[in-house]
Amino acid sequence: MDARTWLITGVSSGFGREMTERLLRRGDRVAGTVRRMEVMDDLRAEYGDRLWLARLDLTDGPAIRAVVDRAFADLGRIDVVVNNAGYGLFGAAEELTDEQIVHQIDTNLLGSIRVVRAALPHLRRQGGGRLIQLSTYGGQATNAGASAYHASKWGIEGFMESTAKDVAPFGIGVTIVEPGSARTRFRDGSSRLATPLSAYDDSPAALTRGIRNPALPSVGDVEKMAAAIVGCADLDPAPVRVALGSDSYSHIHKALTERIADLEAGRDLAFSTDTDTDTDADADADTGAHTGAHTDTGAHTGAHTDAGAEAARR
């Protein structure tokens, strides 16, 4: 396999660090973003100019575009862009401050969107590439006490799935990766907690107050998961979603099964709200024109029905 060049956000720890080390060992080049440059001194000393680094805060929109543009300019071609950086904010919705919610959305959702938008012109011009988005099983399932975090992940999954359809004609593949629990310091390192309200002491949301407990079990193997994420770039066609970890698979499977059951339970109500169609052959011209409009609407509705069925299959 020819050596590739990767752009990965958040390479100082967790999956980002593990992927970077793995890629450099096998001879690839990595453009990585960090908040503190010194944490990468060991890898810079070992791998030299095969590791390109830039300081980046994902809440800084202009800086994101500048860093992405500079990475492509300096490295010539980037084959794979990985949106890895992000963090978890936990607490009941009422416990969170406006500032906490804004920062969560700015980082996990808007930051990832800006990276993609900055990279796409370069990927198109070079004739293709890959976008890999780190999400979580929490992009399709939910837990109490994580409303803002889930909002950021459900949002980015919708954005990436739609973007995948936009850019497929340009040879750009998109994959959303949904890991379960793993010892990446996501819980006890980067996570942020709301200030508790006593009203929620007996709520399921209170369980997230102990998320930083290092004794909490983690199912996933970080090295195996990082290898699987890197391996996504070799899959053709690019899978839209990849679940990693048995807990991720189980949570997503349960959520989708329940969602389909809810949808089927409301089928009659859904169909009952369609527009009535006038089929009277003797209707006057005005009624005929009105029926024609409904026919167009029906075709439009049918298209949405097909799209909905496709989404359900995914």
Image (cartoon, grey):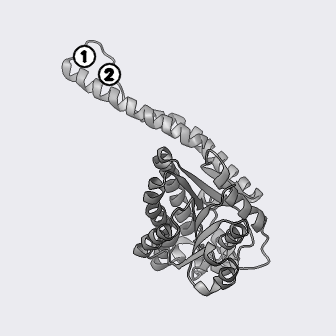
Alpha-carbon distance for marks 1 and 2? 8 Å
- In the image as oriented, which residue stretches furthest toward the bottom? 38
Q: Is residue 97 left or right of residue 186?
A: left
Residue placed at 52% from the left, 55% from the top? 160
Mark 1–mark 2 CB contact (< 8 Å): yes
Residue 239's spot in the image, x, y percent? 62, 48
- Disc number for residue 283: 1
Position of residue 296 relative to residue 199, above or below, is above
Q: The N terminus is located in which quarter? A: bottom right
Q: Residues within 10 Å of mark 1 (few under 14, many from 20)?
A: few
- Tell me the number on the disc at residue 298: none
Would you identify the image quadrant in which residue 236 lies?
A: top right
Would you identify the image quadrant in which residue 299 lies?
Answer: top left
Residue 92: percent from left, percent from top: 57, 72
**Residue lying at 59% horizontally and 49% vertically, measured from the top left:** 240
Residue type at tag 1? Ala
How many neighbours does mark 2 have within 10 angstroms: few (below 14), some (14-19), or many (20 or more)?
some
* Residue 187 seen in the current view: yes
Q: Which residue is mark 2?
A: 278
Task: Identify residue type, mark 2.
Answer: Asp
Ranked by sequence position, the earlier of labels 1 and 2 is 2
